[in-house]
Image (tube, grey):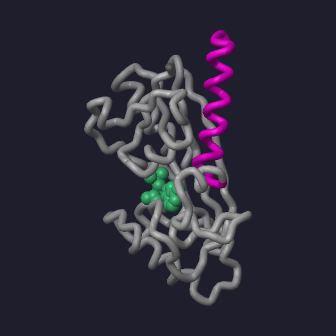
Amino acid sequence: MQQLIFATNNQHKVAEIRAFLGNGFDIVTLKEAGIDTDIPEPYNTLEENARTKSETIYKMTGTDCFGEDTGLEVYTLNGEPGVKSARYAGDGRDFAANIDKLLHNLEGKTDRSARFRTVISLIINGKEHQFEGICEGQIIGHYRGTAGFGYDPVFVPEGDTRTFAEMSLEEKNKFSHRGKAMKKLISFLLNKIKHPQQ
Ligand code: IMP
């Protein structure tokens, strides 16, 4: 079974990815790998932040691993909160405070379209590969649902009427940015298993 360290301390993301992968891959979290570190996200792009996560863990362990970074990009706010999604309302990384700030900034706006974008950086045999996943949708004006995390209670993906917070992990994964990026990662890994020299 392919073992990979997932460079995150976010248990919600780990649960989503495990629900997605089923039993085919052995995903080890930082905690399970005995790594107690909070990897910084110092850059202005998801691509660079995702790469920092995978490179940091690869340097520490020499084990195949992946990191990911996700941002919510709201069109009428020129792509905000984007790469700053976790700390939109301050360093407390408070989900409710971030949503409240977003809803405040969208007051009176007619265009409420937005997208989640995920970039996964995989390092396998010392080489980096990136995979992107995008989910378009709308920011609604009030909280709906209690599942998920982050901006899930106010994001309705295109193709459904429920927020991500009103869906099971499996349902969210069908639409989600992270699900789409994971799908690309998995086809890459399956192909690698079949053709290890490529
Ligand atoms: P990170 O930097 O990739 O951990 O994510 C930045 C922030 O984006 C998180 O703190 C969440 O607020 C938000 N976020 C990331 N993924 C999701 C998601 O799937 N649903 C809702 N919010 C998310």
Q: In the visual, does 34 lie left or right of 100?
A: left
User: Is 67 left, or right, of 136 in this rendering?
Assistant: left
Camera sees residue 198:
no
Q: How many marks?
A: 0
Q: Is residue 84 above or below residue 124?
A: below
Q: Which residues are magenta?
A: 175-198
Q: In percent of the image, x 61 and y 46: which residue is there? A: 179
Q: Is residue 177 left or right of residue 34?
A: right
Locate residue 170, reporting x and y percent: 57, 50
Residue 190's image quarter?
Answer: top right
Counting from the top left corner in percent of width and height, residue 50 is at 50, 42
Residue 102 vertical placement versus 191 (above, below): below
Residue furthest right in the image: 159
Q: In which quadrant of the rendered image does the C terminus lie?
A: top right
Q: Is residue 21 above or below residue 96?
A: above
Residue 179 part of the magenta-drawn span: yes
**Residue located 71% across and 64% down the image:** 158
Q: Residue at x 42, y 21 (%)?
A: 63
Q: Taken as a whole, is the magenta stretch helix, strand or loop?
A: helix
Q: Nearer the viewer, residue 13 or 120?
A: 13
Whether residue 14 is in magenta: the answer is: no
Query: What is the residue that sits farthest to the top in this orientation?
Result: 197
Residue at x-position 40% and y-position 73%: 96
Asked whether the viewer can see residue 30, the reply is yes
